[in-house]
Image (cartoon, grey):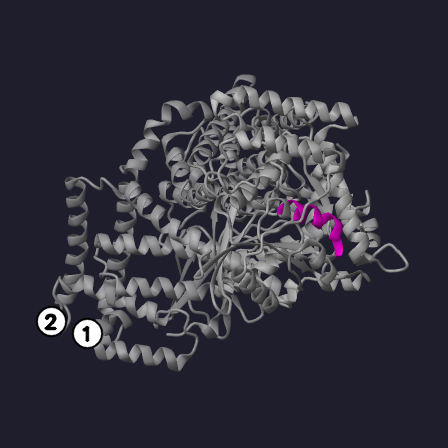
Amino acid sequence: MKKLMILTLTLAALAFAATAFAHSPLCDCFDNGDGTVTCEGGFSDGSSATGVKMYVKDGAGKVLQEGAMNADSEYNFKKPEGSYSVFFDAGEGHQVTVNGSDIVE
Amino acid sequence: MSSQTLLVALAGQPNCGKSTVFNMLTGARQHVANYPGVTVEKKVGHFRTDSRRVELVDLPGTYSLSSYSLEERVARDFILHDRPDVIVDVMDASNLKRNLYLALQLLEMEATVVLDLNMMDVAERRGISVDHAGLSKHLGVPVVPTVGKAGVGGKDLKRILDEEAEKPNKASYKIDYGTMEPFIQKMQDQVVSAMQLPETYPHRWVALKLLENDAEVLRLATEDPKSSETLTRDIEQLRKDFQEETGTPAERHIAFARHRSCAAICRDYMKLPEQKRASLSDRADKFVCNRFFGPLLLIAILFVLYEVSIVFGGWLAVKVWPVWGAVEAFAAKVLPQAGFLEDPLLRGLGVWVVKSTTAILNYLPIFFLLFALIAILEDSGYMPRMAFILDRLFRRFGLHGQSTLPLILGGVYVGGCAIPGVMATKAIPDERARLATILIVPMMNCLAKVPLYLILIGAYFPEHGGLAMFFIATVTLFMALPVAKTLSLTVLGKRESAPFIMEMPPYHLPTVTGVLRRAFERIWLFLKKIVTVVVAVAVVIFVLINFPGLSEKREASYQAQQEAVVGKFMKVVDKTSYKGELLPADVPEIVLFADRLKNAKRGLTDKSAAAAVNKSFEQANPIYYAVVKRKGADGKKLNKAFKKVVKTRKKLRREMRAERFESSFLGVLGRALEPVTKYAGFNWRINIALLSAFAAKENSAATLGSIYGIDGSGSVQESMKAGETGFTALHALALMLFMALYPPCVPTSIMVRMQSGSNKWMLFSILYQTLLGLGVAVLVFSGGKMLGLSGLQAMWGFYGLCVAATVIMALIPDRSAQKADIGKTCKQNC
């Protein structure tokens, strides 16, 4: 029984630390050429990323805009001046950062 | 004896390096099936010697050849019925005495035997030398020293096989059974000669087996009803006479005589190092199997296993994804073009199947790391030690020390996958514990259950998120253990639980090639098994969730909405210079053109490459390009209208999909189940989400999302909360528990079928988990409601119940009479 206790406690500790990887997060961004950018989110198993929090940050990491993936699993935002990055945040272990300079027209 | 194909069987005790010899001989050319009717795996490979083709069959690793365990029976039956031309007995040269025990029994079966003295390197390192020429002369069979791990001696072995095939050399070695010899002779004369034996059965061996009271051979003796009675009487009489004369039961005398022969041979042909120090393995075991350090080390190793395979593997999976993404893109390109609202059937099905497959292929890096790490644990010799440390605990629940790994892979704490978990049960030598493990692995918290937990916890237990996660992460084990015990006391009660010897092989340093070979071998098997199955299952699910389809009236309504949005776009066209050039029929084409352009640029980060893609599309169709990329004043105007078209198309397609799903076979089933599931707090919407989760657990969260028709405004949690008024934390708790116990997803079910070797067990596993899940959900929901408990109270009440059940179950003794001997024979240096 003592062993069972030890086992449970260890598992508990691990459960707290456990990060959940159900599937790989995906986020592709496209420059629309009209001063806006559209990001498409999703997961490797085909599930939609609807509702996933999205952040647009400047070069220093300051959040400029935030929102969420819409029902089409897309997020539109106004392209900021200067360098920026897009942060797709579906929870720990499910995050993607896309560098603004990698988003081409 | 055929001069063309030689049938060779590979025998050997566990941990003698049999599989390394198998790989050394066959390379990667092998396939795995089960022996007919049983769950024992049969590995077959092919190779060529100088003059022949050889079919090599790997027999299960067994210590002996009684008919006591399934493995032993399988090995023995193969030797007796398939009559291999040659049997190669792989022996651990550093554990000669123990290994000889099997070798002598093979010789007694009068088979053509070649002894493979394997692991010569380990023996040398330990200062053991074996006079293999003398041994060969004494036993009258060839003896070949090898180091399978390093591929040394393979050529010699092949040459010997060729020679043996030329001049069949039946073994004639006889163990001297001393005072029993006259009884053996009598048994042969009185009984064996009167039996209707297949000609492949050696008479002396049969006589010995009858004296040993071997159940299988005894059955042969009593097959003929005419002579059955006399023969049984004669056998009993001889056994009784022997015991009276010598004071020892016959079976014990036989075993002792064999052990004595082994010891005598070792004395004559093996030299031990002068100074008999505790070997390095023994010294290491002082720590590894220590009461205190043992579990600590085990936890550390499991933690590393988890970090590397799941966390690092997850990261790697993201890096590898573009490959699978490209496969999807390629499929999308070659399949018939998409329509505006509805896609051609072939496309819909094709995309669905490819998507289902890539969803699983995505896990490949995780599995590869997992398989490689397991191979390291196996090759290093740690695995049996791990089993030893946990065996005492798991035995209480009808499981086995080696159930540890399957449970961990399945996600004993949050984050695993039942597929490799069920696959890993193969290593469990005890039939009953193996089935019990197969049946509870799917109850663990696999990765795919997590999104649903997160949604429900986020929505209904926001203040107690950590506690709720702890609850669901650990309660599963407390549900699984009592269930395992119950199963092994009831449905599995009659299954064999062979007394087993847990033996600690010396530690080996795993080789890179050995580990990689095994990892690739398993990955390949996994791919072949799973991917083919997934394709078949995906087709079935596709039909279930898409048919019978929308009514004509609904179709017409969607059609009208499409025409409306196209009409709006055309109005804008009329105001531009493209009037007359762009027709309504062009609109779907532009949509597809835009999609193609987007896909062509997916993943591009280089400006000039992107520009090149743009240019080629512009050349292909300048007008479409202008609309999609806002070229010129007209392009800008049209682009705005075009975006509305795209958005409407997406919305319509989404609505149609949801509607089709709700009216599909699966959707109808969800409604039909509502009268039953309402006691668990599930309405038809949740039923549908749960049913779709059977295809793959991930679906549940996505389906809930699509059912609750979320728009960009909020998260799934919020819209679910808003969409389901009256849905309480108690509902959420019941749903979470149901999900935890939910039947294995389709790929796992297939794996259960493969590992248990029967459809019956697969169906049982699906059925009992569904019923159990439903029962628990009803208990928690209806019970909690009756007692007026809050979600949190019900949660901890249930937790207490599970822990109590676990403790009680642990204390119930196993009714099955023969309690397994946990004989820990640490390696004997002969």
Can see residue B286? yes
Percent position (x, y) of residue B255? 72, 37
The answer to whether the residue labelled 1 contacts the one labelled 2, judged by CB atoms less than 8 Å apart, is yes
Left or right of A96 on screen, residue B185:
right
Q: Which mark is first along the chain, 2 or 1?
A: 2
Question: Residue B110: percent from the left, percent from the top?
Answer: 59, 47
Q: Start and end of the magenta stretch?
A: B94-106
Q: Report if residue B463 is visible in the image.
A: no
- Figure quadrant of residue B347: bottom left
Q: Chain of mark 1?
A: B
Same-chain check, marks 1 and 2: yes
Q: Callout 1: 10 Å neighbours few (<14), some, many (20+)? A: some
Q: Quadrant of residue B132?
A: bottom right
> Is B187 situated left or right of A65 in this image?
right
Judge by depth and name the residue closer to the eye, B734 or B305: B305
Looking at the rendered structure, the kind of residue marked 2 is Glu
State the separation of the CA atoms marked 1 and 2.
Answer: 9 Å
Q: Which residue is mark 2?
A: B581
* Magenta highlight on residue B104: yes
Left or right of B203 on screen, residue B5? left
The residue tagged 1 is B623
Give how far across and how far down residue B128 sits, in percent: 80, 60
Q: Residue furthest top?
A: B786
